[in-house]
Image: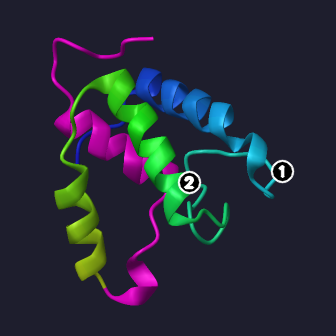
Amino acid sequence: MSELDPQVLHEVLGLIEEVSGDWEYDGPITADTLFLADLGLESLDLVVLGTMIQHHYGQLPFAEYYAEVGQRPVAERDVSVSDLVAFICEHRTPASPGRV
């Protein structure tokens, strides 16, 4: 797993904040927050967030990532914000660290 880039973490938390207005969750969102267990996101929420992330960082292999997550035991399928940030850090193109 790649080292977490604090700037990417900050940017991802900002993107999550942008889309979180319609969510029922109103607690703090940190690197340890889980998308399913803590935030209770639905698949549409994940698609919207994934689209925003790709607009910001460029094309990322989300289909392969979701397939890998889907192969995990059910108890290990939830993804934290830091897991997502590590995925972005590992797969983003070096020339485009952020487009916002």
Q: On the image, numbered disc 1 is attached to which residue?
A: 26
| Amino acid carrying mark 2 in the image | Asp
* In the image, residue 41 lies in the stretch drawn in magenta: no
Residue numbers of the magenta segment: 73-100
Looking at the image, residue 20 sits to the left or right of residue 43; the answer is right
Looking at the image, residue 42 sits to the left or right of residue 50; the answer is right
Mark 1 surroundings within 10 Å by alpha-carbon count, few (fewer than 14), some (14 through 19), many (20 or more): few
- Whichever of callouts 2 and 1 sits on the residue coming sooner in the sequence is 1
Of badges 2 and 1, the one in the foreground is 2
Does residue 57 sit above or below 85 in this rendering? above
* In the image, residue 78 lies in the stretch drawn in magenta: yes
Residue at image x 37%, y 12%?
Answer: 99
| Amino acid carrying mark 1 in the image | Asp
Looking at the image, residue 93 sits to the left or right of residue 19; the answer is left
State which quadrant residue 71 falls in: bottom left
Q: On the image, numbered disc 2 is attached to which residue?
A: 45
Regarding mark 1 in the picture, which secondary structure is present there?
loop
Percent of width and height locating residue 1: 22, 50
Residue at image x 22%, y 39%?
Answer: 60
Percent of width and height locating residue 76: 40, 79
Residue at image x 33%, y 88%?
Answer: 73
Does residue 66 sit above or below 98 in this rendering? below
Does residue 22 sit above or below 89 in this rendering? below
Percent of width and height locating residue 49: 49, 43
* Whole-number angstrom distance, CA of label 2 to CA of label 1: 15 Å
State which quadrant residue 2 falls in: top left
